[in-house]
Image (cartoon, helix red, strand yellow):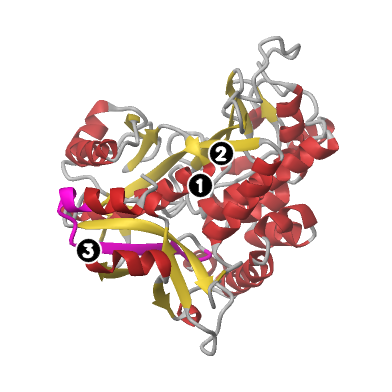
Amino acid sequence: MHDREQVRHQMQADGIQFIIVQFVDIHGAAKAKMVPVECFDDVIDAGAGFAGGAVWGVGQGPHSHDLMARIDISTYTPLPWLPSTARFAANLYVDDQPHPYCARTNLLRVLSEARSQGYVFNVGMEPEFFLVTRNADGTIAPWNPDGSDSLAKACYDFRSMAPAMDFLQELTSSLNRLGWRVYQTDHEDANGQYEVNFHYADALTTSDRVTFFKMTTGQLAKKYGAIATHMPKPFADRTGSGLHAHFHLADAKTGENLFLDESDSKGLGLSAFAYHFLGGVIQHARALCAVTSPTVNCYKRLQLGRGLLATRSGFTWVPAFASYGDNNRTQMIRVAGPGHCEDRTVSSGCNPYLGLAAYLTAGLDGVARRLDPGPVNAGNLYELTLSQIAERGIQTLPQSLREAVDALQSDEVVCSGLGAIAREFIELKSREWESYDRQVTPWEVGQYLTFF
């Protein structure tokens, strides 16, 4: 719905009394104000006011003029857990001008530039998350109300999934009432870990939905005595959570999938256009990691060498190499079918607005420069040594946030995808790494206290 009177009538029919005006900070965390529905016109035309200095990464201090969050009426989303309330995603303005530090506004900019070239970026993202409980001593454990979710290989296991059925069915039904077309839900590789798959859309709609998905899981889980966490790696010995991105570019006029070519001589069903796009992604992969895996914790998931066997199930299911191949989950980019690519490195900690803006910019750089992604990789990359990986000309992905931020800082193309946010992002993430690097962990105390 794009007409305000149509939305107003729908809110009346739905019994909406309050509006959540919601945007995200640089981390992708939802920030919001609640206003009465009678203020609907105000939050369209003027916006809800915020003190920007209280929000991470929006380029403001305590002296700055107010951020005004103006709702996008096409994002009308009734809250499944609070029937009298609806959420609208918002874009930030300052002094009546679009704010360049707004992640959603920045994605709109990048998508607009792509559309001017004739392209629409279609994306489906697969959010993985854990249900956990917090112990009295502050530690966490997988949510496991009947004790059945304890298998080393818990993926797809019915007995492990059964206790969560009520939660997952309520979540699925709620999202489908919103028109998301959830088509499957499963227990993932780790104990207490789940994934929900919903139909793809344009990159902006998908980013709005991923943000709302995190809000919804957090609230519905409370009803079942659990905490829903999108932390990438909450348990050292269990698989981490991704936000796998399935994507293709379409013709802006016809909707034709520009990645599809059934006559592909490489046998993957990809067009020359798609290979050039992948060439850009792979060339810029190390810098992209800073945006798609933006926390210290993400790099406990992107592991090399022995780390690939450091989970109870035997695999991390996370590629650590900038590669592409066929329907093969040891690749960064899995070609899941003709014209259909999936990046498996994207972390559940990713801000989707920033991640997809950077990703599209990198891919289109490959198109503009007709970059070659290299040969198709086949077989189990986990079994190759690092020297064998190097012999294939495959670069490894960063193994720490510091390494990724260094790559981002020297990559003008990926930084351009972040616009004004790039400098703020690099500074904030550098401080995050420095803060982490100064910590003395229990592992260090146990390892070194009487070592010397």
Amino acid at the residue labelled 1:
Leu
| Relative depth, front residue between 356 and 266 | 356
Which quadrant of the structure image shows residue 261?
top right
Identity of the amino acid at label 2? Val
User: Which residue is disc 1 drawn over?
Assistant: 204
Element carrying mark 2: loop
Q: Please tell me how crowded label 2 is: few (under 14), some (14-19), or many (20+) other residues with Cα within 10 Å.
A: many
Q: Are marks 1 and 3 in contact (CB under 8 Å)?
A: no
The answer to the question of whether label 2 and label 3 lie on touching residues, with beta carbons closer than 8 A, is no
The quadrant of the picture occupied by the N terminus is top left
Q: How far across and how far down the image is residue 197, in percent?
A: 39, 34
Residue at the disc numbered 3: 18
Q: Which quarter of the picture shows residue 252? A: top right
The residue that appears at 37% across and 37% down in the rendered structure is: 195
Question: Which residue, given by chain and number where applicable, does mark 2 sit on?
Answer: 318
- Residue 429 against residue 142 in the figure, above or below: below
What amino acid is labelled 3 in the image? Answer: Phe
N-terminal-most mark, 2 or 3: 3
Which of marks 2 and 1 precedes in the sequence? 1
- Report helix, strand or loop for mark 1: helix
In the displayed structure image, the side of residue 194 where residue 169 appears, left or right = left
* Residue 381 shows up from this direction: yes
State yes or no: residue 156 in magenta. Answer: no
Among numbered discs 1 and 3, the one appearing first in the sequence: 3
